[in-house]
Image (spheres, grey):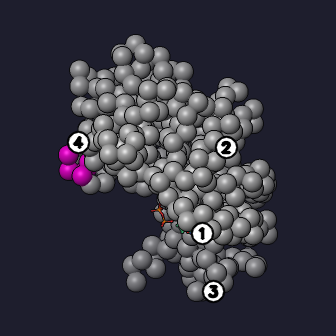
């Protein structure tokens, strides 16, 4: 692939750099034979769901890996969030970031709890603990921090605020499986943490998730709620739902666990390749991860500064999509700009300047085991070409839009 001038870009000449799309969120697949073996055992056992042996083994492996007391495997993280929220007794108002996937806010709204959107720290993309405190009202019952891109929230500051105001604190750790904070694995903080093992996560169970906690009573409530509230045969003790993980998902999870280190190594190598490929491009900032902590490196996130580069994030995404590099605008728009929140709180943006700024700047680039180092070099070369000619490219793109 050689693109020497902007007229060579596919957005103008229609010839993409990649014949097949390069996706963000391509699943990592572990050892297929091991997976098929497990599926075969599952069929032989005729035990497909309802906390079967694979789910139990998966939960046990996760508690060991994370160093937590309890792990309840779930059908997905959204239901995990809903159940954790309910089991914690949250009601009224709960403070959450708007700069997150919509599931975080919906898990509250689904239960008629008001998500109160708090701004984020532009350096970390996570909840700004100073701002959290200003949003607490007599109706506030909790805080949900999101470890966005897997980078841990300001956990101590949030815990301090939660303790001071007698609030519950939990974390949406959908991005943070395998990561640590000050020597402890994510999963050990707040009252509960929720992981996602969706296909697009670096560690997947097709669909899936887990709620983890060190609180015995809470774990018991969550376990019951995940299975309709059943406590033994014929005895229902809570309003529950069906949040159970299936055996085939747990089989995938156990297989993925065996390749976990290999996935992380590839992610880290890809991260370094992007670091090299994007180095020195003015106005482009690849987010960093603390090298003192365990990190899954599952997201390649860049911030695009239009003022410096002369090209907006959206135009850059347009250029990349034409090349079949399907960069994503996570998280755009902020939750407060989506329904029903946009209608409920039409002026929420006034209190969310950093969120609004980030949602215009951030994009996610392809990584994972489906992406090779040569492909990354090509992606970076295209970005460099586009940015080095940012103003001219913007002018030509606006002419194209005009046509
Ligand atoms: N909290 C946070 C902070 C989250 O980010 C998420 C999920 C949740 C909670 C809820 O977790 P779950 O209930 O899902 O366990 C995707 C994922 O569906 C979602 O799990 C994830 N966050 C979110 C950030 O990304 P979409 O709507 O962007 O998905 P979609 O279909 O556009 O796919 C994304 C990319 O992945 C595409 O480029 C195609 C590619 N892909 C996808 C699948 C499913 C594949 O290549 N193969 C596949 O099998 O939400």
Where on the picture, by quarter, is residue 249?
Answer: bottom right
Q: Quadrant of the C terminus?
A: bottom left
Crowdedness of circle 1 by 10 Å Cα count: few (<14), some, many (20+)?
few
Residue 26 horizontal side relative to residue 357, left or right: right
The CA span between labels 4 and 1 is 41 Å
Q: Is residue 216 above or below residue 83?
A: above
Q: Earlier in the sequence, mark 1 or mark 2?
A: 1
Of label 4 and label 3, which has the lower sequence position? 3
**Nearer to me, 163 or 255:** 255
Q: Is there a contact, CB below 8 Å, between mark 4 and mark 3?
A: no
In the depicted structure, whether residue 74 falls above or below residue 247? above
Say which of marks 1 and 2 sits in front. Answer: 1
- Magenta part, dominant SS: helix
Kindly report which numbered mark, 2 or 4, lies closer to the viewer in this rendering: 2
Spatial distance from mark 2 to mark 4, Cα to Cα?
Answer: 35 Å
* Of the two numbered discs 4 and 3 in the rendering, the one whose residue sits closer to the viewer: 4
Residue 175, x across and y down, in percent? 56, 47
Residue 270 appears anywhere in the view: yes
Q: Circle 2 sits on which residue?
A: 61
Which residue does the image show at 31% across and 51% down from the upper left?
A: 337
Q: Which residue is mark 3?
A: 15
């Amino acid at each position: 692939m050689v693109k020497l001038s902007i007229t060579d870009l596919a957005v103008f000449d229609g010839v993409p750099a990649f014949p097949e799309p390069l996706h963000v969120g391509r699943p990592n697949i572990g050892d297929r034979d091991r997976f098929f073996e497990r599926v075969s055992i599952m069929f032989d056992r005729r035990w497909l769901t309802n906390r079967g042996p694979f789910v139990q083994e998966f939960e046990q492996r996760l508690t060991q890996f994370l160093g937590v007391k309890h792990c309840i495997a779930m059908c997905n993280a959204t239901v995990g969030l809903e159940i954790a929220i309910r089991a914690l007794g949250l009601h009224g108002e709960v403070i959450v970031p708007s700069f997150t996937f919509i599931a975080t806010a919906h898990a509250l709204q689904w239960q008629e709890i008001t998500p109160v959107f708090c701004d984020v720290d532009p350096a970390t993309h996570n909840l700004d603990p100073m701002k959290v405190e200003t949003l607490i009202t007599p109706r506030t019952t909790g805080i949900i921090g999101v470890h966005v891109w897997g980078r841990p929230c300001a956990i101590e500051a949030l815990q301090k605020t939660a303790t001071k105001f007698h609030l519950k604190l939990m974390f949406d750790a959908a991005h943070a499986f395998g990561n640590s904070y000050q020597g402890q694995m994510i999963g050990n903080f707040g009252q509960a943490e929720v992981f996602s093992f969706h296909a697009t996560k670096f560690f997947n169970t097709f669909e899936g998730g887990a709620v983890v906690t060190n609180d015995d009573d809470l774990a018991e409530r969550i376990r019951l709620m995940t299975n309709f509230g059943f406590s033994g045969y014929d005895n229902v003790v809570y309003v529950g739902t069906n949040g159970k993980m299936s055996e085939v998902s747990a089989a995938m999870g156990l297989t993925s666990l065996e390749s976990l280190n290999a996935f992380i190594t590839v992610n880290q190598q890809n991260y370094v390749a992007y670091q090299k490929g994007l180095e020195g491009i003015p106005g482009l900032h690849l987010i960093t991860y603390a090298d003192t902590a365990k990190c899954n490196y599952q997201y390649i996130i860049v911030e695009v500064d239009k003022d410096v580069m002369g090209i907006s994030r959206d135009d850059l995404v347009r250029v990349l999509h034409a090349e079949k590099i399907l960069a994503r605008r996570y998280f755009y728009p902020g939750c407060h700009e989506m329904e029903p929140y946009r209608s409920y709180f039409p002026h929420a943006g006034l209190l969310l300047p950093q969120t609004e700024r980030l949602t215009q700047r951030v994009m996610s680039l392809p990584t994972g085991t489906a992406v090779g180092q040569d492909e990354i070099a090509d992606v970076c070369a295209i970005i460099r070409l586009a940015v080095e000619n940012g103003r001219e490219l913007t002018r030509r793109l606006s002419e194209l839009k005009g046509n």
